[in-house]
Amino acid sequence: MPLEKRIVGIAGLGLMGGAIARAMGKLNPALILAHDIDSAVLRSAEQGGVIAKGFEDPVSMLSRCDLVFLCLNPSTLIRFTEEHMTSFKEGAILTDVGGIKESIAALADRVRPDLDFIPGHPMAGSEKDGFLHSEMVDFTGKNYILTPVQRNRPENLTFFKDLILRMGFARITETTAEDHDDKIAFTSQLCHVIAASLIHCERDTGITRFGGGSFEDLTRIAMLNAPMWTELFLENRKKLLERITSFEKSLDEIKEMIGAARAEELEANLSAVRNRRSAMAE
Amino acid sequence: MPLEKRIVGIAGLGLMGGAIARAMGKLNPALILAHDIDSAVLRSAEQGGVIAKGFEDPVSMLSRCDLVFLCLNPSTLIRFTEEHMTSFKEGAILTDVGGIKESIAALADRVRPDLDFIPGHPMAGSEKDGFLHSEMVDFTGKNYILTPVQRNRPENLTFFKDLILRMGFARITETTAEDHDDKIAFTSQLCHVIAASLIHCERDTGITRFGGGSFEDLTRIAMLNAPMWTELFLENRKKLLERITSFEKSLDEIKEMIGAARAEELEANLSAVRNRRSAMAE
């Protein structure tokens, strides 16, 4: 069934839910519906033409949707899906956009037999949150990680991957939930912990007069959504702690070279770092 | 004397020297001359109309210049200035663009009595280096730090500050060399150490498939000019080590909240971080 005949539902019309609704709008599905607990957000999205209709009560929306994007924080998402398990339309495809995947993969394994939950993680966002900032999120050229479960139907996976590329994403990586959570602990969560720690240790808000771009780049993501990141950090605690420890060890090695003024070793290591970073794709 | 009557000299036509030559070009000084040890760079700058004439031997250039930008690594700069002390034009203004200021302030204090050395630090750059990338450096809206010494002449300071703003910089902060080195240890050097440490602890160059912007932002500056940053780190060793230690303590506090799953405390701290970062000017 082509997208033009499918009804798309967004549960949670925040930053990512809003960005997905906007991207979907350009692809002409049969209808775009959304559920949110904030009626003002729903009215604004309706008036802006981002969605056809908003629902404060999810039940009547879920029963109509062929494809549902669950754009909720992980714990809320799990509770929401369990609670409304009987409300989803027969044979619907479900997917999520969350930053951790192991608990979501477990959920995907236990949804109603006719439903097909494909866990996903669009690697895009903004340091701002909420629907009102969703226009700022740009999917062009970004990564999308999928952690399919065994029971996902091949035809649904094919359909969804095609949709992801049509939304503007450049690369789809399929991997296990565990591998995702391990890599993301490094590329995303550790980076947020570092940015937060940089701000946590400096009380002078005038310090940016001494900024030349590096500090601004490293700490922009410190403007994080605190409840969401608290959940992500704690949910992926074990892997994140390993990554923090490994980073601390690495930092300590460089600190020692500086402390002992081992210029040649320091320069050789900085050169190696430069080369490795340059070898990494943007 | 207006800029239109002054001859400007650039010693060291790399990334910053090139960027300054280009910015000066738009302000119509009497002439722009440059010295570099790489004759290919000088020829390319001449052909591109960025400078009027390049000199491999600095002596004949220095004797003509009313304003000299010393765009060399700190140790080279100090050696160069000492070595050519007799070559500078009577009454010339000298300035530098380096990332550490205490040793430069000491140099500014001991130049020939008729010379006026105003130590400065334009807070702009690029992760690429060399003259060929100097076109990428944008001064618009950036910070410029000055750490004047007692003997700097007020009329020269006024002239130079006006010039900085005409180059496109938005804010000039005047402070002591010591304060500069302390703040820069945090906003610049620590950030580069962190970026380098992040790459130092990850061998998988395919990791960027799992990047969503944060990792890319935090590690772009890991593509650093290794010899220059080795010098900057070691020259400012004491203050940088203090900043690394304070960051490590801060990181450890957040790591502990995560490790002990103290959700409320973690969320409160992340909220505080978000608010403090938002309060900082960009």
Image: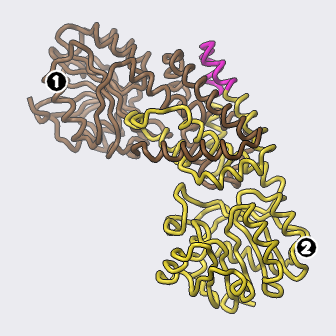
Chain colours: A brown, B yellow
Q: Amino acid at mark 1?
A: Asn
Q: Nearer the viewer, residue B14 or A9?
A: B14
Q: Which mark is residue A156?
A: 1
Residue A152 visible from this viewpoint: yes
Q: Residue at x 63, y 37 (%)?
A: B275
Give the class, few, some or many, for how many residues have Cα within 10 Å of label 1's Cα (few <14, many ≥20).
Answer: some
Q: Position of residue A11 (x, y in %)?
A: 32, 25
Magenta highlight: main SS: helix
Occupied quadrant, residue A167: top left
Give the class, few, some or many, for how many residues have Cα within 10 Å of label 2's Cα (few <14, many ≥20).
Answer: some
Q: Amino acid at mark 2?
A: Arg
Q: Position of residue B73 (x, y in %)?
A: 69, 62
* Residue B240 falls within the magenta-colored stretch: no
Taking B59 as reference, is A57 left or right? left
The reply to whether the C-beta atoms of the residues labelled 2 and 1 are less than 8 Å apart is no
Report the span colored magenta: B252-269
Q: Nearer the viewer, residue B87 or A278?
A: B87
Taking B255 as reference, is B134 left or right? left
Q: Mark 2 = which residue?
A: B151
Q: Which mark is residue B198?
A: none
* Residue B254 falls within the magenta-colored stretch: yes
Numbered disc 2: secondary structure = loop
Q: Position of residue B173 (x, y in %)?
A: 75, 62
Taking B219 as reference, is B271 left or right? right
Occupied quadrant, residue A60: top left
